Amino acid sequence: MTVETPHAPARDAAPGAAGTNPFDEAQWSTPYGLPPFERIAPEHFGPAFAKALAAHQAEIAAIAADDRASSFDNTIAAMERAGQDLDRVASTFFNLTGSHTNPALQAIERDIGPKLARHGSAIYLNADLWARIARVDADAEHLGEEERRVLDRYRTRFRRAGADLAPEPKERVAEIASRMAVLGTRFSQNLLADESGFSLPLDGEDDLAGLPEFLREAAAEAATERGGGNSHVITLSRSLVDPFLVFSTRRDLRERAYEAWTHRGEGGGETDNRAIITEIVALRAERARLLGFESFAHFKLDDTMAGSPDAAMQLLREVWAPARQRAAKERGQLQALVQADGGNFTIQAHDWRHYAEKLRRAEHDIDESEIKPYLSLEGVIQASFDTASRLFGLRFEEVRDVPRYHADLRIWAVTNADGSPVGLFLGDYFARASKRSGAWMSAFRSQERLSGDIKPIIVNVMNFAKAPKGEPTLLSFDDARTLFHEFGHALHGLLSDVTYPLLSGTSVSGDFVELPSQLYEHWLEQPEVLRQHARHYRTGAPMPEDLLSRLLAARTFNQGFSTVEYTASAIVDMTLHLSAAGEAGLDVLAFEADALRRIAMPAEITMRHRSPHFAHIFSGDGYAAGYYSYIWSEVLDADAFDAFREAGDIFDPETAARLRRFVYGAGNLRDPREAYTAFRGRLPSIDPLLKKRGLVQAAA
């Protein structure tokens, strides 16, 4: 989700001229309407937010006070047209706070979060506005399907925000929203501080023992960027920590790195997130109860494809049993390797990746350092573009003389096969201390047609370890999969084909939004894609067929471990939000430990995201009681890719056309069950998922 100093303004974007504010301009004259990053300084955001908030408040007040009879155009469409200046300021600001922040932006973030929450609450709890929305008559106006969908989504959103509540609980819901904005921001900033504040120095050959050349080079580059007197360092960038845990033969250093990685957010002091989590869980439970729901999980899943916590938990249980069984077999194999190596210890969590790599070499005659030379970042980017071209007819042309917020940012103009514009794609690939961890997709501008033919500006953010200057960055296969995953999200934003902003792109149910991204990963694993794009970074030679065969044969290797670490996180998330424990003073670590005990979590495996650094569910509400959505969507994606297999062509034009129309291009035009059925002809089965993860035999 190259390090600029995080304690100074972003020097890639120079401050604007004195007395000018780029956000005062009605439109930006930059190429493609990109934000003029070089002219935007932190001090511009405060006045810009104030002005945009006031303008939006006036627009909403005018709609609510309109003395004409309520209609779709003067109420719903008017709301969709309102707030464009606020959207522009907010999208620019929050993309920067995630990707390239600094103390000035973080201070603004702490201030603006509660203000935006109060602003949103004032809209959703406005009784006059709600009355107008309720009076819009779809049948009398003969509204089309898209207009009916927008109207329905507005009514659902207002009800879920408390529009039907009495004045006193309405006020409390607004107070909760404001406080939650404060807490989510603090959680994120604490996590970033813990991540950027840690480095493990590696000095001398003993500390570097076992590390392949690519990892030594990445650790040396990280040391240079961090400054100081160390020749090599391991930071908490996943692209450094993961391979270090795989390759380092220094068990003591693996343990130190693993402890730092898994204990982010719980080290005591100002950056400890445990008290924040306690308050967040309590406030979520209270809000759900005010809205008439048994728990926050019941509230959250009421508006999803799953429909209820029971349905989500049932899926998690169906996956957990065979995954745990498979992991137990894997653990036995790894312990045998420890003994064979002369190790007189029981395998621990910080050992698993190291011995799993040894087992993979033994079973499949393959190791990560053999694969990476064939997976340059450039090659994988081109593979993702070529796949989109073959599926959807897209073309990508890199543009260089355009504004950018960091020197590493790359930008492509995206067009259809006939040359018509689709949008702009931004790729921000390298880790730095000013960027939060992880990988994600976001939008500087979303597609819509209500205000004109608005083309999207979509960004993918990664945290790959940057190679030394002059050398290509090489990816692990997991890194390559992450790039394909996020590019699937990007295509969901780029290919959006709707009229109304509310329905645009990824604005879909939380357990449907991962379908386009996870489905896209499948093409990376196809031999014909790898044969074309997996080429040696020095010689240009394609990956040898023998290596390709061994790589693909190892796809389900270690899937017990991977499925257990993910599913445990999803179960803890759901269990936490089915509970009201936070109201009595939640001890989050004790709760987590008890939840894991009850599902018999293997001691040698740690949750993928422990609660104190579980940004998915505590930096905001997006994935709260919704982390299950990855596995829910994986049921969909495994079944969906089978549609191409059944067609006899992984790029079958007719299947791809349906996929673009009903999934990637459809936004939230339809209920997700209707959308999937329109593409596939039926709802999915769990069987392709179990087969994909190699859990079928374990489940039998």
Image: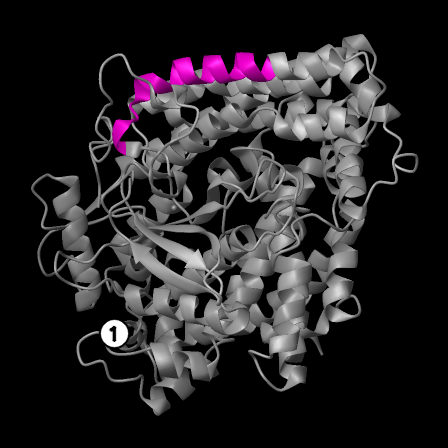
Q: Which x, y percent locates residue 443?
A: 48, 42
Q: Identify the residue shown where x is 47% and y is 65%.
A: 394
Q: Residue furthest top?
A: 168
Q: Identify the residue shown where x is 57% and y is 65%.
A: 519
Q: Quadrant of residue 124?
A: top right
Depth check, front residue: 543 or 211: 543
- Magenta residues? 38-57
Q: Which x, y percent locates residue 233?
A: 18, 49
Res. 583 in view: yes
The kind of residue on which mark 1 rests is Pro
In the displayed structure, 576 sits above or below 242; it is above
Q: Identify the residue shown where x is 42% and y is 22%.
A: 109
In the displayed structure, 201 sits above or below 527; it is above
Depth check, front residue: 329 or 642: 642
Which corner quadrant holds the C terminus?
A: bottom right
Q: Identify the residue shown where x is 58% and y is 17%.
A: 56
Res. 638 in view: no
Q: Which residue is mark 1?
A: 373
Depth check, front residue: 494 or 682: 494
Q: Quadrant of residue 643?
A: bottom right
Q: Residue furthest bottom?
A: 546
Q: Main secondary structure of the magenta part?
A: helix
Q: Residue furthest right?
A: 140
Q: Which x, y percent locates residue 70?
A: 83, 22
Q: Is residue 460 left or right of residue 587?
A: left
Q: Which x, y percent locates residue 547?
A: 35, 86
* Count of marks, rendered view: 1
Q: Is residue 590 left or right of residue 197?
A: right
Label 1 secondary element: helix
Check residue 39 for magenta coloring.
Answer: yes
Q: Is residue 216 left or right of residue 568?
A: left
Depth check, front residue: 345 or 665: 665
